[in-house]
Image (cartoon, rainbow, N blue to C red):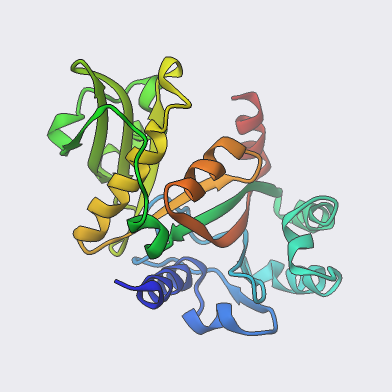
């Protein structure tokens, strides 16, 4: 795959997720559409969306409940720049409009795609043994210390892992979840005593290459405030590709706050 192939696949997947066309993300003007169920969407998404905003940097594609579309359109017209829709204080007016749906903005994240030059030019500083793992190898690893690499609630989607070992003991783990047919999402964990040794970067880079070898596009997601995770994505050969802000019912948001 080259850069164009990867972007084309990502745009196509985002189009499935947001009930629009891939070319909508490349327009100069914003696009607003009704959110609909889609068999090809990322498998962890609860569709249809109440409201979801996404941008690849050119414009904003917004999808949501049909009755909320006029409010979403009015909101977008009142925000001067794309980035204002994905940060405070610009997000507060959107929350006010979402009150009628009993919803609030919940998730705000940045997504990364591989930079093929950087990915294959990566030089690992990790001195630990790395092993490629299959689902049967990590069936007993659904524990808190590996909760970013593996997802207990969606373990049937975890398809491949790469572990770092110190004298036979697992000290770092990257996992890939088959969240959609063409794209697999990467998560990574390193035990506290082994951090800042280049393990996370080495694992992320290796599992990205393993994913590409299997004909899938690896992608990486991080909250903007998670500087450590963003830094890992960039150092291991990824680059920012798109951003999203997603609304959820107030009860869901409050549950997230309570933990």
Foreground residue among 188 and 45: 188
Q: Position of residue 116 (x, y in %)?
A: 37, 64
**26 is higher (above) or lower (below) than 218:** below
Query: Quarter of the image containing the C terminus?
Result: top right
Query: Quarter of the image containing the N terminus?
Result: bottom left
**35 is higher (above) or lower (below) than 156:** below
Which residue: 40% across, 72% down? 3
Q: Position of residue 189 (x, y in %)?
A: 40, 30
In the displayed structure image, the side of residue 167 where residue 152 appears, left or right: right
Count every numbered label the image shows and give the total: 0
Which residue: 70% across, 72% down? 69
Foreground residue among 157 and 258: 157
Q: Residue furthest left?
A: 136
Q: Position of residue 208 (x, y in %)?
A: 32, 51
Which residue: 49% across, 41% down? 232
In the displayed structure image, the side of residue 238 where residue 176 appears, left or right: left
Image quarter for residue 170?
top left
Q: Position of residue 197 (x, y in %)?
A: 43, 27
Image quarter for residue 254?
top right
Which residue: 71% across, 48% down? 104
């Amino acid at each position: 795959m080259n850069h164009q192939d990867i972007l084309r696949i990502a745009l196509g997947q985002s189009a499935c997720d947001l009930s629009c066309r891939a070319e909508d993300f490349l327009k100069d003007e914003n696009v607003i559409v009704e959110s609909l169920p889609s068999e090809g969407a990322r498998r962890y998404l609860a569709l249809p969306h109440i409201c979801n905003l996404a941008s690849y940097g050119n414009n904003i594609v917004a999808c949501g409940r049909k009755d909320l579309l006029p409010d979403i359109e009015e909101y977008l017209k009142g925000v001067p720049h794309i980035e204002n829709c994905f940060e405070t204080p610009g997000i507060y007016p959107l929350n006010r409009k979402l009150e009628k749906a009993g919803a609030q903005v919940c998730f705000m994240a940045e997504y990364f795609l591989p930079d093929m030059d950087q990915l294959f030019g990566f030089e690992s500083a990790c001195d630990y043994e790395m092993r490629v793992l299959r689902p049967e190898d990590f069936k007993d690893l659904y524990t808190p210390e590996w909760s970013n690499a593996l997802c207990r609630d969606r373990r049937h989607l975890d398809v491949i892992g790469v572990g770092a070992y110190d004298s036979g003991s697992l000290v770092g783990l990257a996992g890939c979840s088959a969240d959609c047919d063409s794209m697999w999402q990467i998560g990574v964990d390193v035990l506290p005593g082994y951090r800042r040794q280049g393990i996370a970067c080495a694992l992320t880079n290796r599992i990205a290459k393993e994913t590409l070898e299997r004909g899938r596009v690896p992608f990486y997601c991080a909250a903007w405030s998670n500087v450590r995770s963003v830094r890992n994505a960039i150092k291991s050969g990824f680059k920012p590709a798109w951003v999203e802000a997603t609304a959820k019912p107030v009860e869901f948001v409050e549950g997230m706050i309570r933990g």
